[in-house]
Amino acid sequence: MRPIQRCSSQRAKNDVIDMFWVYENEPTNKTRIHLGRCPWCNCGQGIDKPKEIGILGAWHGPFQNYKQALDCAESTGKPVNNCGHCHPERFTE
Ligand SMILES: [Zn+2]
């Protein structure tokens, strides 16, 4: 149910740049929703801190709309919040 998809090509990156991603943070027990273009998300690859990628948490997505991302985020069972940088909640349909 939770495949971690990455932007494997430039074309794919363009296609998903404005899609929604969910970051499940294991150490802090929080789940946050981002837009793909957010620097903290970087299209599901996270920022340039390898220790924070894949070890301390997991990216889920991409999702085509906020609702899908929210459904996934809530399914983690962790408290869900929206990124304060990219504000995905402003892009609800
Ligand atoms: Zn963000």
Image: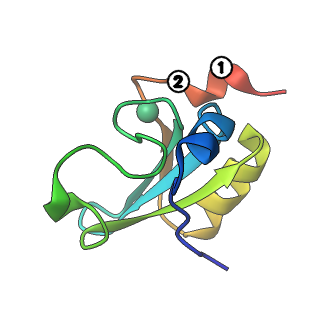
Q: Which residue sits at x=28%, y=62%?
A: 53
Identity, as a three-letter code, of the amino acid under mark 2: His
Q: Quadrant of residue 89?
A: top right
Q: Which residue extends farthest right?
A: 93
Horizontal and vertical percent for residue 34? 51, 38
Q: Name the quarter where the C terminus is drawn.
A: top right
Q: Residue 27 location, x and y as percent? A: 24, 67
Q: Which quadrant: the N terminus? A: bottom right
Count up the numbered dots. 2
* Residue at screen point 20% across, 46% down: 48
Q: Which residue is mark 2?
A: 87
**Alpha-carbon span between mark 2 and mark 1:** 6 Å
Res. 48 mark = none
- Residue found at the very far front of the displayed protein: 10
Whole-percent x and y of residue 57? 33, 66
Give how far across and how far down residue 68 sits, in percent.
Answer: 76, 51
Ligand 1 positioned in quadrant: top left
Q: Is residue 55 left or right of residue 80?
A: left
The residue under the point 46% across, 51% down is 44
Reading the image, the residue beneath label 1 is 90
Q: Nearer the viewer, residue 10 or 37?
A: 10
Q: Residues within 10 Å of mark 1 (few under 14, many from 20)?
A: few
Tag 2 and tag 1, C-beta contact below 8 Å: yes
For label 2, being within 8 Å of ligand 1 is answered yes
Indicate the secondary structure of the residue bearing disc 2.
loop
